[in-house]
Image (spheres, helix red, strand yellow):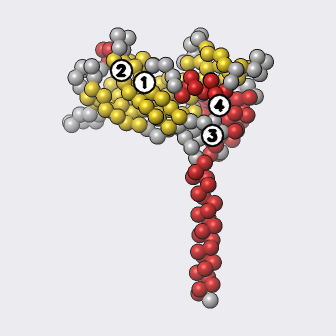
Amino acid sequence: MTRRVFRLLIAQFLLILACLLPQVARADGVEIRRASIEASEEGYRLNARYGFELSSDMEDTLQHGVSLYFTTEVEFTRPRWYWFDEKAIVARQTIVLGYNVLTRKYSVNVNGSLKQNYSSSLEDALLSIRNPNRWVVAPRTALKVGENYNVKLSMGLDTNYISKPLKVSALNNSEWRLTSDKKIFQYKAE
């Protein structure tokens, strides 16, 4: 009797494990492939490359004219031994991916600027989000030259901009979770 119960418990455990494994494999997010800070005359620029794919639900939503918002967050902190770390810079950039049903073209808009890139294919539009232009995150005076800073970078789909009916579905569906892990690296201010 106990062997039969033990076998039944093992079978149920293996069945649960088999159901969970495909879900873990499908939960892809945004991969930060490259991230660095460059000093220029305008200020400090973020040079980053991302890797991600849209789920089929996201593509369908986009095809119906609903825009998707991708937000990149950068935070510079300077470690201090006597108190909490000093937050030197906190910056956010939002990139909007849209589709015009009438012209059948995709648009990519950065932070509400007037400049938009139009593309007839989704892959071309996604390429401009995966490989964004170098973004000035702070002026030259924001960091102390010679000091070491911890840079924390994250990027992902911002569900705050999604309409309420779609937001309920997006929050409960794992296919709508498209975010990166926070990437932390060191930068010595120049």
Report which residue position mark 1 lands on.
47
Pointer 3 local density, CA inside 10 Å: few below 14, some 14–19, many at least 20: many
In depth, the one of 95 and 84 nearer the eye is: 95
Report which residue position mark 4 lands on.
162
Check the picture and name the quadrant holding the N terminus.
Answer: bottom right
Where does the image place residue 78, in percent across and percent down from the top left?
28, 30
**Which residue type carries mark 4?**
Ile
Query: Foreground mark, 3 or 1?
Result: 1
**Mark 1 or 2 closer to N-term?**
2
Report which residue position mark 2 lands on.
38
Q: Quadrant of residue 123?
A: top right
**Which residue type carries mark 3?**
Trp
Query: Foreground mark, 4 or 1?
Result: 1
Left or right: where 110 falls relative to 149:
right
Report which residue position mark 3 lands on.
176
**Mark 4 or 2 closer to N-term?**
2
The residues bearing labels 3 and 1 have C-alpha atoms spaced at a distance of 26 Å
Q: For the point 54% across and 18% down, which residue is it?
A: 111
**Which residue type carries mark 1?**
Asn
> Most extreme residue toward the right, as rendered?
102
The residues bearing labels 4 and 1 have C-alpha atoms spaced at a distance of 27 Å
Check the picture and name the quadrant holding the C terminus.
Answer: top left
